[in-house]
Amino acid sequence: MSSRRKKKVKIKWGRFLLCIFVVCAVVLAGLLFWPLPDKAEPSEANTQNISDTAEDTELSPEPAEQTEFSLLIRCAGDVMAHMPQVRSAKRSDGTYDFSENYVYVTKYFEEADLSLANFETTFSGDGSYSGYPGFDSPLVLANNVYDAGIDVALFANNHMLDSRLKGARNTVKVLREAGFTTVVGARYETTDDRSAIREVNGVKVGIVAYTYETALVNGKRTLNGSYMDSSAPDYINTFRYAKGSDGKTHVNSEDLASIKSEIEWCRQSGAEIVICYFHWGTEYRQTPDNADKELAQFA
């Protein structure tokens, strides 16, 4: 074969391969970039068939649509009044007004969907007031805190028996009369619920509150180092610490069962969110105790 013929064959094969490449490229581009047709609407006949079938067959329900919501919750603590504060709240006519204490924080409580505050004082109502170590405040303090935008009054702390059980029960009554429809941590009657459900923006929020007891003295239970009335556990939510077989301090198993029961009660009552308020920790210590970490994990 002459060199000229060889050249012609090479040219023909080159053109053939080029054509194949171009065809493949066009097909690939069509698959990648050509817009797909919209889903065809069912014909009248198809629509009729679907309708007829629906009459004879139970259609599965539509899956529940998940919704998102925003909920701003703020918690403050602890509300108390030492005697210098009580004296500064006294007016010339002999009444008391603590409202000035909250003028700079009211906006933060009011803009929240739910605001909670722990009252670490009592309202015995006997007209005599005291600060540390046994807090007993003018009743108007409850009204001033409510007017500042707090929705939920938490009453579970080591000072809740400062005016004995009678004062604790009266504190619950005063808080309710001030406008707090939700008071958690103590109850006025043993028939009252220990925990509470509060609906906020269509969401049910469960609230559980407990405080720690101090060590037994002469075999008797104490709160803040003072003897508790024998019937106090029927009215207030507390938990005890106990040494375990490992030599470490843990929360009493009986009290853990009580806390668990209250959380379950909230869930069974429809709570989608449960807030557990624990008044705990070693005073002036900057880190939590192991027993408190365990309780948090348990909750």
Image: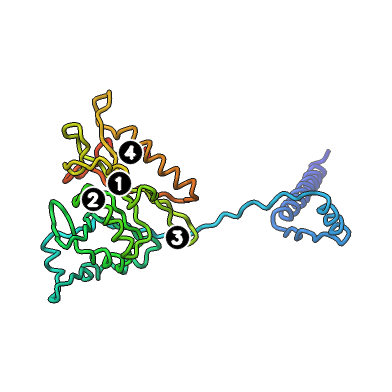
* Label whose residue precedes the other's in the sequence (1 or 4): 1
Residue type, mark 2 in image: Met
Q: CA distance from mark 1 to mark 2?
A: 9 Å
Residue named by callout 1: 236
Q: Quadrant of the N terminus?
A: top right
Q: CA distance from mark 1 to mark 4?
A: 18 Å
Q: Which residue is mark 2?
A: 160
Which scheme is used to colour this image of the protein? rainbow
Q: Are marks 3 and 4 in contact (CB under 8 Å)?
A: no
The residues tagged by marks 1 and 3 sit, at their Cα atoms, a distance apart of 26 Å
| Residue 60 rendering spot, x and y as whole percentages | 72, 49
Question: What amino acid is found at the position of numbered circle 4 in the picture?
Answer: Leu
Q: Secondary structure at mark 3?
A: strand
What residue did someone put label 3 on? 200
Question: Who's the residue at 20% across and 31% down the image?
Answer: 219
Q: Amino acid at mark 3?
A: Val
